[in-house]
Amino acid sequence: MNLAFRDIRHSLGRFLLTCFGLSLLLGVVLSMIGIYRGLVEDALTLVRAPAADVWVVESGTRGPFAESSRIPGDTREAIARLQGVSAAGSVTYQSIEAPYVGQKLRLYVVGYEPGRPGGPDRIVAGRPIGRAHYEMVADKRSGLALGDRLALGRNSFTVVGLTDGQVSSGGDPVIYITLLDSQELQFELAPPAARREVARGTGPGNTDTINAVIARVSPNAAPESVAEAARRWKHLAATTQAGQETILTRSVVERARKQIGLFTGLLLIVSAVIIALILYTMTMDKLREIATLKLIGAPDRTIIGLIVQQALAMGVIGFGFGALLIATIKDYFPRRVVLLPEDGLALAAAVILVCVVASGLGVRLALKIDPATALGG
Amino acid sequence: MTNPVPEYPLVEVRHVSKHFGEGETRVDALRDVSLEVHPGHVVALLGPSGSGKTTLLNVIGCILEPSTGWLSLDGEVVYDGRWLRSDLRKLRLEKVGFIFQFHNLLPFLNSTDNVAVVLSLAGFDTAESKRRAVELLDYLEVGHRKDAMPAKLSGGEAQRVAIARALANRPRIILADEPTAALDSQRAGIVMDLLRKVATEQQAAILAVTHDEKIFDRFDHIFHLRDGRLDGNEGSGA
């Protein structure tokens, strides 16, 4: 006879309400983990999109995502000639705000050379950029649609293609334009500033500057040896794709990762305390029943089973509700929430552990109950 | 459903004392108490508040350890200066049934399961536990309420289910704490009739703490406790 199940069934509404409250808490814990995973995935999406093997940036920097990096536009030709390099492309990266239907649209602009590495990896609607100027491929998250026109700098761009899920580490949707357009957007001075420079006699500056060169290497060449070769130029630094991903996850999103990790840890502790208090209160409500059970000869394992089984049921149901809730609403979050099965299983295991540990308080109380308290009215 | 009649007292208490605290704070709850309860007898334990009735009931029920003395239950010496059995809960399960003032039925189990739970604890399988529980409920004329939850039972019905639970494992000794205090005189009479039936048919010894004057004439014997001492007996047969 399962006493825990019978007790739950007897006060089912109250139990489910408790589970629902717990599920909201565990849902928040799960969403925090999902937000962290989303943060890392967002950060890695952009660096993985060009399917590069080597990143070449300005010497002394870890750019282009962790730090600012500016190198001459002709660096790509030099890198392309290195032994083992099969393809190379110049890229620029910058954040901008552009007016769109009466609002400011925050975007992350990638400038690349069509036909070379650095462009979008998959276009879900429309076509890639086909003209040298004023065409763009935008991510669906920007809210832009095919054919939309958007003013960037002094020029107006037409959306010709759409990507899905391309965002920067800050969560801004990515748009792709040609390298020439992006260089103009990033490095060309505004007309008043340009006029001032002309008046000073310095003339308009050279805009043939890029943030990085992306290189793909042949299957029989080692990316590390290509990076090593690139580093021989004193004005360049180079990292492999794995190194660039490490920089992103360990540097760019490190604080956010720690922040979310700490918050998730705190939430787990709060959950543990709340579960412990719920179980303690549930045990307090059953003092007379537990005393009666002891008096009629129930062994400790029966009493412990009653409390621990209810704790586990509460944890499992609370976690189940919470996971279902977050899985249902995750797509409505402004930033990506990634729920991985292994994270869910790890949290489920943690919740079960927390329930067992938290039930210790109730078990301790139950074991201390004097069976004599069942007597005496 | 009857037990063979033993020739020895089912409850035998010899020179039992119990004190709480030491020095100036010492309270002597029981002083050199000796009594016997024989099979088939229903006896009462009377006394004013603080006289030691509940302490004596707890000692006989193996809930409270005496300070000194000797105790035998159903022919087995269980205390002789120390408990002679390590698992007192099992001892209670095997030898003693309890009836409470407010029935103390588990609110999350129906009548059948409230009785069957004792049998489950004793190691019977679920089907056998339920079969015997229903049998007991029928025996105590409350079988028609076998599926009812305690909250739906009247006071008399609940107390009959509680008596069924006390009898479930066929104990020889029934300890009752104010079994009729929460009942009107008619239902109190019915409960006492049932206890008498159990004592006679099961050859059990029933020891009840009570203040209920309207049922005094239903006991074979009445023990009076005053300041922890037994100070005189009434009735016969104990």
Image: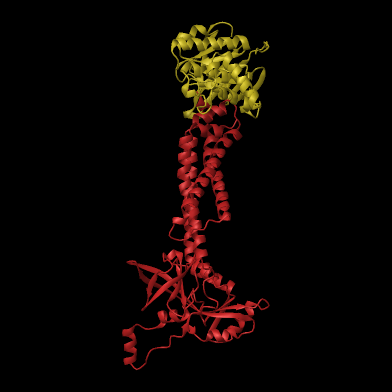
Chain colours: A red, B yellow
Where does residue B3 sit, x and y in percent of width and height? 66, 13
Q: How many marks?
A: 0
Residue visible at 46% across and 85% down in the picture: A208
Image vertical order of residue B198 relative to residue A67, above or below: above
Split into 4 quadrants, where in the image is the C terminus of chain B? top right
Image vertical order of residue B101 relative to residue A151, above or below: above
Image vertical order of residue A210 relative to residue B162, above or below: below
Q: Is residue B70 visible?
A: no
Where does residue A195 sit, x and y in percent of width and height? 32, 88
Closer to the camera in the image, A259 or A283? A259
Q: Is residue B47 left or right of residue B125?
A: left
Q: Is residue A302 visible?
A: yes
Residue visible at 61% across and 13% down in the picture: B204
Split into 4 quadrants, where in the image is the N terminus of chain B? top right
Residue visible at 54% across and 11% down in the picture: B194
Where does residue A158 sit, x and y in percent of width and height? 41, 73
Closer to the camera in the image, B25 or B120? B120
Closer to the camera in the image, A363 or B136? B136
On the image, which quarter does residue B95 sit in? Answer: top right
Q: Is residue B94 left or right of residue A165?
A: right
Where does residue B57 sit, x and y in percent of width and height? 54, 20
Closer to the camera in the image, A170 or A283? A170
